[in-house]
Amino acid sequence: MRQMSVIKSICVYCGSSSGRDPRFAAAARRFGEILAHHRIGLVYGGGSTGLMGALAGSARDHGGAVTGVIPEFLKARERVFHEADEVIITADMHERKQQMFERADAFVALPGGIGTLEEVVEQLTWAQLGRHMKPILFANVAGFWDPLLATFDHLHDTGLVTPAQRLRYLVSDNVEDIVPMLAAAAGGLTGAEAAGEPERVGRM
């Protein structure tokens, strides 16, 4: 399967709540601004609450293109972001995730809850099974993803994820580094990926 050579749109998974650490929302707003600056389209869950709302609102405020994908049953709960350039209403979560996958050239996980975790792990699973080669990056704001990354290491260490099945993902502790890392990964495997290790830069 061919690696993507250009990042035109990024699917961002993140919480419909803001969490207790103000750095989460600050990172979401900054990343929305960065996407707009680079003219990279945002594909996300379509809500206007929490980190989702901070991300989409910032991208839109700075002139970025925003596509929201939300299932019918979540329209009221997550408050559809009507300022998006396009809002796609799906029948269920499965269709939502498929639409987000098809419209994105890469995936970024900002802090979020169980839904965010489920979505990004599904992309890791699909990549592990050879269904896509789109870059996947954890935005490790304030060390949010450290416990999950430790779990990935544990899976490797115990042999339940073999070298042939190694998980391919990037980790950035600073949102400023996300776009350059994804662009580099889209152009071919990094040295770290080729060695089966996650690439990691910076610390916020």
Image: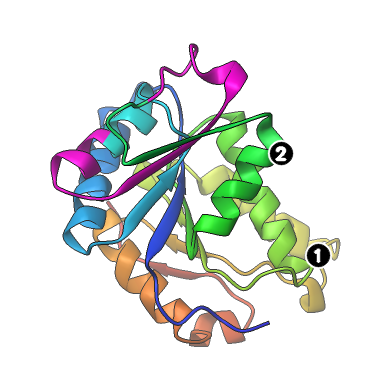
**Horizontal placement of 189 versus 121: left or right?**
left
From the viewer's side, name the closer residue of 107 and 39: 39
Residue 68 shown in magenta: yes
Residue 98 visible within the image: yes
Callout 2–callout 1 Cβ contact below 8 Å: no
Q: Which residue is mark 2?
A: 94
Asked which secondary structure carries label 2, the reply is: helix
Residue 203, image x and y in percent? 30, 56
**In the rendering, which numbered label is found on residue 125?**
none
Question: In this picture, which residue range is highlighted in magenta?
Answer: 57-80
Looking at the rendered structure, the kind of residue marked 1 is Val
Residue 30 shown in magenta: no
Looking at the rendered structure, the kind of residue marked 2 is His
Q: Residue at x 42, y 21 (%)?
A: 17
Q: Residue at x 65, y 48 (%)?
A: 98
Q: Residues within 10 Å of mark 1 (few under 14, many from 20)?
A: some
Cα–Cα gap, marks 2 and 1:
26 Å
Q: Which residue is mark 1?
A: 161
Asked which secondary structure carries label 1, the reply is: loop
Q: Residue at x 45, y 82 (%)?
A: 5
Q: Where's the N terminus, which quadrant? A: bottom right
From the viewer's side, name the closer residue of 76 and 13: 76
**Horizontal placement of 34 versus 159: left or right?**
left
Mark with earlier residue (2, 1): 2
Residue 167, image x and y in percent? 68, 66
Residue ranking furthest to the right: 160
From the viewer's side, name the closer residue of 34 and 40: 40
Nearer to us: label 2 or label 1: 2
Q: Is residue 113 above or below residue 34?
A: above
